[in-house]
Amino acid sequence: MKALYCQQNSSGEEMTFVFQERENLPPTRENDVKIQVRACALSWIDTKLLSEIKLEKELLPVGREVSGVVLEVGRKVSFFQPDDEVVGILPLDSEESGLCEVILVHEHYLVRKPEKVCWVEAAGTVRDGVRAYTALHYLSQVSPGKTVLIMDGASPFGTIAIQLAQHRGAKVISTAQSLEDKQYLERLRPPVGTRQPLVARVIDVSNGKIDVAESCLEETGGLGVDIVLDAGVRTYNNEDESTLKPQLLPHKHDIITLLGVGGHWITTEKNLQLDPPDTCSLFLKGATVSFLNDEIWNLSNIQQGKYLCILEDIMEKLASNIFRPQLDEPIPLYEAKVSMEIVQKNQARKRQVIQF
């Protein structure tokens, strides 16, 4: 069997993705589940995080969000039986590449896949679902009547976050990075009931002339939004900004300005720098800043029960059509290397899923 791995020979070098011939799988351990993989979604590999937690290797396995059929179970496995359909996310320290026909996974990283959910949708939704739940449920407690700003709502993650926020009764505002994204967001509708758009207001930031803070304050009558979920921020003035940072991202001052009293700012910016005037503004509003790291569930097993409940709920909402993911056409395994290169360069606007 072949499996896909990421190779980075020295610091700063561009990654290369290689197929390696695998020897036969080791015997199934007591709590392991042997899975025949049917689909595997591709996600960006955070090599810096892996280095910080001492998981850096010469060959990193590629592909962690998998769906498939159980072939065999260890003698202490209690959740699954052969022929069960399952879905899950392989842990950070897994030696297994999801882009392989047969893999071994500990049973505590898997849940059952509903029959009406296809393999590709299951694998392609599970990570974005975990991120959305982490941000909107555990970090900010979204609830009916709250106003949520979701940056770059047309991204795969933004799409699921919008659907979860609206399902919980929140009013959703979103930004669009192109005319195509704007049209996509305006067409989003709930699966049943009212045919009102999922997004109350779409702010087109593609031309750089629209003030996001001003638009949000106008939409909320000057009160500001309760929850902000960013897709990265600019932390300096334009003249000091690195050319690598897209100018479509909002400035940190804009987010602080549009945040309401008691608001929650959920950021994906790991290098966020806040100066004393910024923290003073947040203090006066009684607002909080939280960092979205969806790997925390795998970095600490103390919350394993909650994590499995999240995975089950994601599959339930997928089965009931509440979650409709932003997926590209299924990709055959032989194109996995090219697709992974696109994903690693952050050039994919839809979730890429390999179908076996």
Image (cartoon, rainbow, N blue to C red):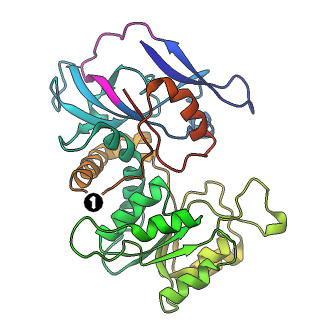
Query: Is residue 266 shown to the viewer in this render?
Result: no
Q: What residue type is labelled 1?
A: Ile
Instruction: Give the image quarter of residue 337.
Output: top right
**SS type, badge 1:** loop
Q: Position of residue 169 (x, y in %)?
A: 30, 74
Residue numbers of the magenta segment? 22-38
Residue pictured at 57% horizontal, 67% vertical: 179
Residue pictured at 25% horizontal, 56% vertical: 321
Q: Residues within 10 Å of mark 1 (few under 14, many from 20)?
A: some
Per the image, the residue denoted by label 1 is: 322
Q: Which residue lies furthest to the top in this view?
A: 23
| Quarter placement of the N terminus | top left
Residue pictured at 58% horizontal, 77% vertical: 282
Q: Residue furthest right?
A: 239
Q: Residue furthest bottom?
A: 221
Q: Where is residue 344 in the image (x, y as percent from the top left)?
A: 60, 39
The vertical placement of 281 against 295, above or below, is below
Task: Please indicate whether residue 204 sits to the left or right of residue 190 in the image.
Answer: right
Task: Please indicate whether residue 203 sits to the left or right of residue 299 in the image.
Answer: right
Task: Please indicate whether residue 6 sits to the left or right of residue 323 in the image.
Answer: right
The vertical placement of 129 against 222, above or below, is above
Q: Position of residue 125 (x, y in %)?
A: 37, 47
